[in-house]
Amino acid sequence: RVLDARTRLVLPGAIDSHFHIGIYRDLARDAESETRSALAGGVTTVLSYFRTGQHYLNKSGPYRTIFPEVVAATEGHAHTDFGYHIGIMTTAQLDEVAWLVAEQGVGSFKYYMFYKGLNLTSDSTRGADYTMSDAYDLGHLYRLMERVAAASAAHAARGRVSLSLHCEQAELIRVFIEEVKRGGPQGLEGYHRSRPPLTERLSIAEAMVLADATGCPVNLLHLSSDEAVAAGTKGRRDHPHLDIRLETTLHHLALTHATAQGILGKVNPPIRTEADREALWQAVVDGRIDTVVSDHACCAEEDKQRDLWAALPGFGGTALLYPYLVSEGPRRGLSLARVAELASANPARAFGLYPRKGTICVGADADLVVLDPEREHVVTPALLQSAQDFTPFARLRIRGWPTHTVLRGRVVFENGRVEGTPTGRYVKRPVG
């Protein structure tokens, strides 16, 4: 089949390396609808986070039994190729890291730095029930970094093995939430102040000390503020021998707490100020930020229509990955090559997929996007083709949308419609 791409752009398929399949909905059903949304934005591979505990499958235990169940529930339902980052939540699971890398193709792991604060709440049972962990603290993180560093050394010739970190400092969050509840601003501005940039900065500093002690390659996830980028940049400057990658999200680049549709825009870390948004864009332009992702987590509007503290955090946005960067990036001085690095090549390199994914070259998977740079739409939930019935990006006007998405040489999305049944495959990493 021949696709006429005259007057169009052809880019390598995007790799949305921060995704949450099944976090709030049935995993198989979520895989089908949300990878369908991904195709609409030119995404051909998603790397989803999974952990034991509340949400996802709502259980704990060994990954030797749980992880094959996760892959089986996704296969046959995903329209994109897919992989998983794994949260190691218990002491027993630490001993499964080597098996997950060597035999299951899991090249990346996750630690949620603010979860350790659940052990400090007045209702300690709630925290234990949520994480289903025995000792989820900095000691656990240190042991996890040791395991990941060992796996990284063993498999370096095949590709990168790393640990991703959600950096917010739990004890400070407790103090600031109490302060906002006593009389701070309401809505998303209040949420921003309840988890301010200081919590990111201190958490990143903690992580850098442990990464230096263990030599663990790390990814600093969804940086949301000027302070967070500065802390990540300082970490790289102070520890040039470490492998540190910086990530930000579409919503932190596109939105502020004043424009994100109120409580619908609740997410962790929070959407912040215009000054933070501009600082993030500057870091994208000057190269300090390595990847841009969606942090896609489909939920329903009714899950948001509670009070600020009870509303579920997160929302979808994967269908905007290439459109937003192609629309906004060149206006800020980004070349199309840099856009493709941020959305495709760099995540492929970071997560053990390159050069099978992330580039257009002989021998790579034929994951391609044909994009019309003049096609303009105002964002609506229907346009994004997700099961989510709202979007904080509503009313954004974006120019540059895919007309075709090609997965391994087969057209899977054409002129607004997904073609055929799901054909996504589980991709083992690192593939070298």
Image: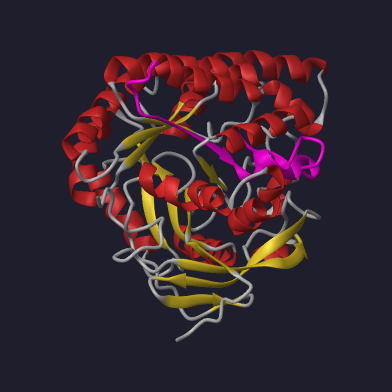
Q: How many marks?
A: 0
Depicted 213 relative to depicted 413: above or below: above
Task: State the residue at coordinates (66%, 48%).
Answer: 329
Is there any visible trace of residue 57 in the rendered image? no
Q: For residue 266, what is the image quadrant?
A: top right
Q: Where is residue 337 in the image (x, y as percent from the top left)?
A: 52, 52
Is there any visible trace of residue 420 in the rendered image? yes
Q: Position of residue 101 (x, y in %)?
A: 23, 43
Q: How is the image coloured?
A: secondary structure
Q: For residue 138, what is the image quadrant?
A: top left
In this view, the residue in front, 363 or 257, is 363
Position of residue 54 in the picture relative to residue 281 (left or right): left
Q: Quadrant of the N terminus?
A: bottom left
Q: For residue 305, what is the image quadrant?
A: top right
- In the image, which residues are magenta? 239-268
Position of residue 137 in the picture relative to residue 190 (left or right): left
Position of residue 165 in the picture relative to residue 182 (left or right): left
In this view, the residue in front, 192 or 14, is 14
**Residue 310 part of the magenta segment:** no
**Residue 255 part of the magenta segment:** yes
Q: Which residue lies furthest to the bottom in this view?
A: 1
Q: Position of residue 80 (x, y in %)?
A: 44, 65
In this view, the residue in front, 67 or 365, is 365
Task: State the residue at coordinates (23%, 47%).
Answer: 64
In this view, the residue in front, 407 or 78, is 407
Task: State the residue at coordinates (74%, 34%).
Answer: 308
Depicted 83 relative to depicted 180: above or below: below
Q: Position of residue 365 (x, y in %)?
A: 35, 66
